[in-house]
Image: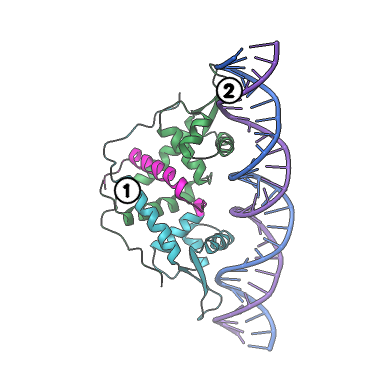
Chain colours: A green, B cyan, C blue, D purple
DNA sequence: CCATACCGTTTCGGATGCGCAACGAAAGAT
DNA sequence: ATCTTTCGTTGCGCATCCGAAACGGTATGG
């Protein structure tokens, strides 16, 4: 996948700008990373595991789950075999949200070919 | 640039997770989009112009500029031909920050080829 | 001149996030 | 049974962000 740093930045810019209009949620970078991680890596997911994988403190994970849970993008479920654990589960709404984001990004990435406008140095 | 929605999501996940460690700033999605926009689109940039281009209110732009200015990623300069305007200028530190981010993303994108782990539907 | 329009900033009240430390519940060890 | 460890959560104080409205400084038109 030949993708220069410049192209990647340009892609990132277009997707983020396009997403500013679409996104009703306005998630933090951490919250978004957490959401992506849960949906794209194999379960099970626990608070402790996410804390380690994302290098974030446990309270940060808990609060991100609060927010994503309020949005119904994610759900908590007690682990019945070890009731200390909390398993994080996906939801329909979260799947839709991420799939739309992925489609949006893919559409923007498609017509990108030649190296775009350069990142000029400061004056 | 053949890039499926799945691949894009996976790329996004890896970059965001990798960036959680590197990023000293923890920028908002809006702040990051603003930063990218200023560095990747041709000047001049004004508050009003950015507000329209990013579909954000003027106070949001002002506050983002406060934050990015404190970080020395961006600089304000009064327009001397029309002193009502404020021109937003790039800085060395901002250039370095974005270039490192672009390099990181490009490195992560490089080894991605086959369609990665699927986005499974919720249970 | 003076009125008007424009630009970016500030103020206000309220919501949200953070790090750190302490906490209760549950499991495991002795 | 009790002690210890592990789990996720919560309280605290502080910083940041938001939207809506009001504000002062600057240009422009009559």
- Same subunit, labels 1 and 2: the answer reads no
User: Which label is found at residue A71?
Assistant: none
Quadrant in which the N terminus of chain A is drawn? top left
Q: Position of residue A77 (x, y in %)?
A: 55, 24
- D20 up-or-down from D7: above or below: below
**Residue at 59% from the left image edge and 37% from the top image edge:** A59
Q: Which chain is home to disc 1?
A: B
Q: Verify whether residue B10 appears in magenta.
A: yes
For residue D21, which quarter of the picture? bottom right
Q: Verify whether residue B103 appears in magenta.
A: no
Quadrant in which the C terminus of chain A is drawn? bottom left
The magenta region covers B1-30
Depth order, front residue of D27/A114: A114
For the residue carrying disc 1, how many other residues have a C-alpha within 10 Å: few (<14), some (14-19), or many (20+)?
some
Q: Which residue is mark 1?
A: B107
Depth order, front residue of B71/B116: B71
Depth order, front residue of B45/C7: B45
For the residue carrying disc 2, how many other residues have a C-alpha within 10 Å: few (<14), some (14-19), or many (20+)?
few
| Most frequent secondary structure within the magenta stretch | helix
- A19 up-or-down from A51: above or below: below
- B9 up-or-down from B99: above or below: above
**Residue at 45% from the left image edge and 63% from the top image edge:** B93
Q: Are marks 1 and 2 in contact (CB under 8 Å)?
A: no
Q: Which residue is mark 2?
A: A84
**Total numbered labels placed on residues in the image:** 2
Q: Position of residue B102 (x, y in %)?
A: 36, 54
């Amino acid at each position: 996948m030949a993708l220069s740093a410049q192209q990647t930045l340009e892609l990132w810019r277009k997707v983020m700008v396009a997403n500013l209009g679409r996104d009703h949620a306005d998630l933090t970078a951490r919250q978004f990373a957490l959401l992506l991680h849960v949906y794209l890596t194999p379960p099970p997911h626990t608070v402790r595991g996410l804390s380690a994988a994302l290098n974030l403190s446990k309270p940060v994970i808990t609060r991100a789950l609060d927010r994503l849970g309020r949005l119904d993008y994610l759900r908590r479920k007690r682990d019945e075999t070890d009731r200390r654990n909390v398993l994080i589960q996906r939801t329909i709404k979260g799947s839709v949200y991420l799939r739309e984001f992925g489609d949006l990004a893919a559409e923007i990435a498609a017509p990108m070919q030649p190296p775009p406008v350069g990142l000029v140095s400061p004056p």
